[in-house]
Image (cartoon, helix red, strand yellow):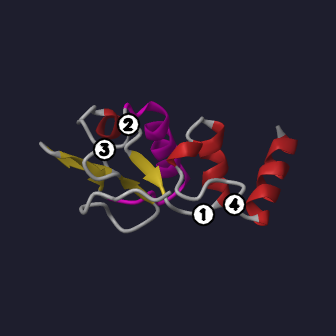
């Protein structure tokens, strides 16, 4: 189920939910170039631009306090990574919603 994004989020799949952030500091500690904030909260200032950025974004997901950061995309690789770190509930379209995502998940588990 989609949540309402903060109006300052950069266009893209990752976003901070409106009126959720408590300024915990995790996003700007882990990925300061991906997030911005003011005294009212934080938002995604720039979407990840590669695998290093995605890894830092996933770390923010794993460490966030109130689960304000969400993923609305449908990329099986990202969905599976979020599921692996226990953040499936932070996905607006969780893995398993399509045959392709189920197949990617199954093949990924085979490689483990």
**Picture quadrant of residue 24:** top left
Dot label at residue 32? 3
Q: Residue at x 50, y 57 (%)?
A: 1
- Write down the residue under mark 1: 74
The magenta segment: 46-65
First-in-chain label (1 vs 3): 3
Cβ atoms under marks 4 and 2 closer than 8 Å: no
- The front one of 46 and 22 is 22
Q: CA distance from mark 4 to mark 1?
A: 9 Å
Label 4 or label 2, whichever lies nearer to me, is 4
Cβ atoms under marks 4 and 3 closer than 8 Å: no
Cβ atoms under marks 1 and 3 closer than 8 Å: no
- The front one of 58 and 2 is 2
- Write down the residue under mark 4: 97
Q: CA distance from mark 4 to mark 2?
A: 30 Å
Q: Residue at x 30, y 44 (%)?
A: 32
Label 1 or label 3, whichever lies nearer to me, is 1
First-in-chain label (4 vs 3): 3
First-in-chain label (4 vs 1): 1
In the rendered image, residue 4, in percent from the top left (x then y), is placed at 34, 59
Rendered position, 44 above or below 67 = below
Of all residues, the one furthest to the right in this rendering is 110
SS label for mark 1: loop
Cβ atoms under marks 2 and 3 closer than 8 Å: yes
Q: Residue at x 24, y 36 (%)?
A: 22
Q: Residue at x 40, y 56 (%)?
A: 3
First-in-chain label (4 vs 2): 2
Label 3 crowd (10 A; few <14 / some 14-19 / many >=20): some
- Write down the residue under mark 2: 30
Label 4 crowd (10 A; few <14 / some 14-19 / many >=20): few
């Amino acid at each position: 189920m989609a949540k309402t994004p903060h109006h300052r989020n950069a266009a893209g799949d990752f976003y901070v939910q409106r009126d959720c952030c408590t300024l915990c500091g995790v996003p700007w500690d882990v990925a300061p170039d991906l997030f911005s904030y003011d005294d009212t909260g934080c938002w995604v200032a720039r979407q990840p631009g590669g695998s290093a950025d995605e890894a830092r974004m996933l770390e923010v997901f794993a460490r966030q306090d109130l689960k304000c950061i969400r993923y609305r995309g449908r990329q099986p690789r990202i969905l599976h990574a979020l599921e692996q770190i226990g953040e499936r509930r932070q996905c607006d379209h969780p893995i398993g919603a399509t045959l392709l995502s189920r197949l990617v998940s199954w093949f990924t588990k085979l490689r483990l």
